[in-house]
């Protein structure tokens, strides 16, 4: 049973079928002028229209990329290099996706300064902190719409207002939110926005960046001048077509999907809290994506939890799939003020449109059994009283080290 849709989502059948012709007979290069090329060009432009409609943008403001990571890099590095004469200060948050954080670190090594805004215990930034961080040399504010681990939704309309009032460009990583909740680049005064196909039931290896008309970026990829001269390289036509179809479906079914996922999410949260002692929800209870559930369970390790759930055919995650090879504590959960022991006992379940209330019951039954089994073996759990034990960390700490 798949419940890791924040990591990736399965390609919908309609998306797959839309791609097939462009993997076979319609294999033309969009840059050529004969019929095969014109057909490919038309398909790419139709996809562009669908992606633009999903975020209330103009099609000419959509540039196709290889995914969310490239889009983040293109936005942040593109602005930094283009406006380095104006300033070298960037504002972002402590809980951004690594694609944003690593890009900022790259720029810091090259003389840029980055302010990382803290978040509260629910994962939300303070607009006052943002205002106080602005300097004369601030050239970019980059704040994600929704977090990939805890699903917390940031007040991007307020961020956009602050950015506009101060004449600063605003980039928003909306990889997790697009297709799950309404995204309106005009209403939020967004200048640059990152999107990924495989998070909305489209193919991997394709994404897009929204660049508001009039915003200038330094190019990162030089070549044949495709994508309005902003992103060179022959277009991935089958991927773009699939992305466009996924965007079309997301737009058409947005309201019903939100209603369904919210019902599933709330049922999952309610049943986990009712069935499993000392299970605590990470992130904001209400102000979160409709498909995201992230819990921490006292006295267990998340890795063991994931492996045992996997053995039962249930897929979840201990944190961001992009960094799941690391056993380090999640920096997102750490930013909420949680201790390492709490963080390592966390589990993310991210629902999809194919899930059902029966799936929720199946997962909760399995989770209850697995957590109880792990706790029976844990030295941090009092099985007699069914509660966690206080851990005196001083007993395990060498003061000379």
Image (cartoon, rainbow, N blue to C red):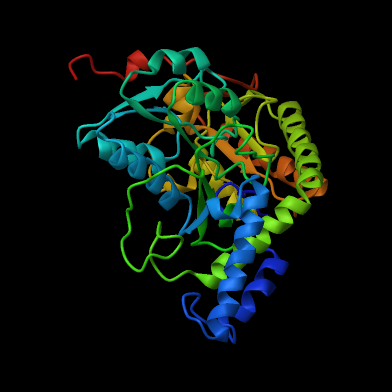
Residue 343 percent coordinates (x, y): 48, 29
View extreme (left): residue? 400
Looking at the image, which residue is at 43% across and 50% down? 69
> Observer-nearest residue: 102 or 244?
244
Left of 376 or right of it: where is 97? left
Q: On screen, 138 above or below 146?
A: above
Quarter residue 225 falls in: bottom left
Left of 92 or right of it: where is 146? right
Q: In this figure, what is the number of numbered marks?
A: 0
> Observer-nearest residue: 336 or 103?
103
Residue 282 in view, yes or no: no
Q: On screen, 168 above or below 176?
A: above
Left of 232 or right of it: where is 179? right
Residue 314 percent coordinates (x, y): 64, 51
Looking at the image, which residue is at 54% across and 50% down? 61
View extreme (front): residue? 214
Looking at the image, which residue is at 72% across and 32% down? 269
Residue 362 percent coordinates (x, y): 76, 47
> Observer-nearest residue: 239 or 279?
239
Q: On screen, 165 above or below 9?
A: above
Residue 296 in view, yes or no: yes
Left of 111 or right of it: where is 162? right
> Observer-nearest residue: 88 or 22?
88
Residue 147 percent coordinates (x, y): 54, 35
Quarter residue 88 falls in: top left
Quarter residue 296 falls in: top right
Considering the image in quadrants, where does the C terminus appear?
top left
Considering the image in quadrants, where does the N terminus appear?
bottom right
């Amino acid at each position: 049973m798949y419940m890791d849709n924040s990591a990736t989502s399965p390609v919908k059948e309609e998306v797959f079928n839309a791609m097939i012709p462009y993997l076979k007979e319609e294999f033309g290069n969009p840059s050529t002028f004969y019929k095969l090329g014109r057909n490919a060009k038309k398909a790419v432009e139709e996809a562009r229209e669908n992606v633009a409609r999903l975020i209330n943008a103009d099609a000419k403001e959509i540039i196709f990329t290889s995914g969310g990571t490239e889009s983040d890099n293109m936005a942040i590095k593109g602005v930094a290099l283009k406006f380095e004469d104006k300033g070298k200060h960037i504002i972002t948050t402590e809980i951004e996706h690594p694609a944003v954080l690593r890009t900022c670190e790259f720029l810091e090594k090259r003389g840029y300064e980055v302010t990382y805004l803290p978040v509260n215990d629910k994962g939300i930034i303070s607009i006052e902190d943002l205002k106080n961080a602005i300097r004369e040399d601030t050239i970019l504010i980059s704040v994600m719409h929704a977090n990939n681990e805890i699903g917390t939704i940031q007040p991007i309309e307020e961020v956009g207002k602050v950015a506009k009032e101060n004449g600063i460009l605003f980039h928003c990583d909306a990889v997790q939110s697009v297709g799950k909740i309404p995204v309106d680049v005009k209403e939020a005064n967004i200048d640059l926005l990152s999107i990924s196909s495989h998070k909305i039931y489209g193919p991997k290896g394709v994404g897009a960046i929204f660049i508001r008309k009039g915003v200038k970026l330094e190019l990162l990829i030089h070549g044949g001048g495709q994508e309005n001269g902003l992103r060179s390289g022959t277009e991935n036509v089958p991927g773009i077509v699939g992305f466009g179809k996924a965007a079309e479906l997301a737009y058409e079914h947005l309201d019903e999907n939100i209603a369904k996922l919210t019902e599933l999410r709330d049922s999952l949260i309610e049943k986990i809290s009712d069935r499993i002692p000392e299970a605590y929800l990470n992130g904001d209870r209400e102000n979160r994506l409709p498909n995201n559930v992230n819990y921490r369970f006292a006295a267990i390790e998340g890795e063991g939890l994931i492996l045992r759930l996997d053995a039962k055919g249930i897929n979840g995650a201990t944190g961001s799939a992009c960094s799941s090879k690391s056993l380090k504590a999640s920096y997102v959960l750490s930013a909420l003020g949680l201790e390492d022991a709490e963080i390592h006992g966390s589990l993310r379940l991210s629902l999809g449109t194919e899930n059902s209330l029966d799936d929720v019951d199946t997962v909760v039954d399995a989770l209850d059994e697995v957590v109880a089994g792990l706790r029976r073996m844990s030295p941090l759990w009092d099985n007699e009283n069914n509660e966690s034990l206080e851990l005196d960390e001083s007993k395990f700490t060498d003061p000379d080290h």
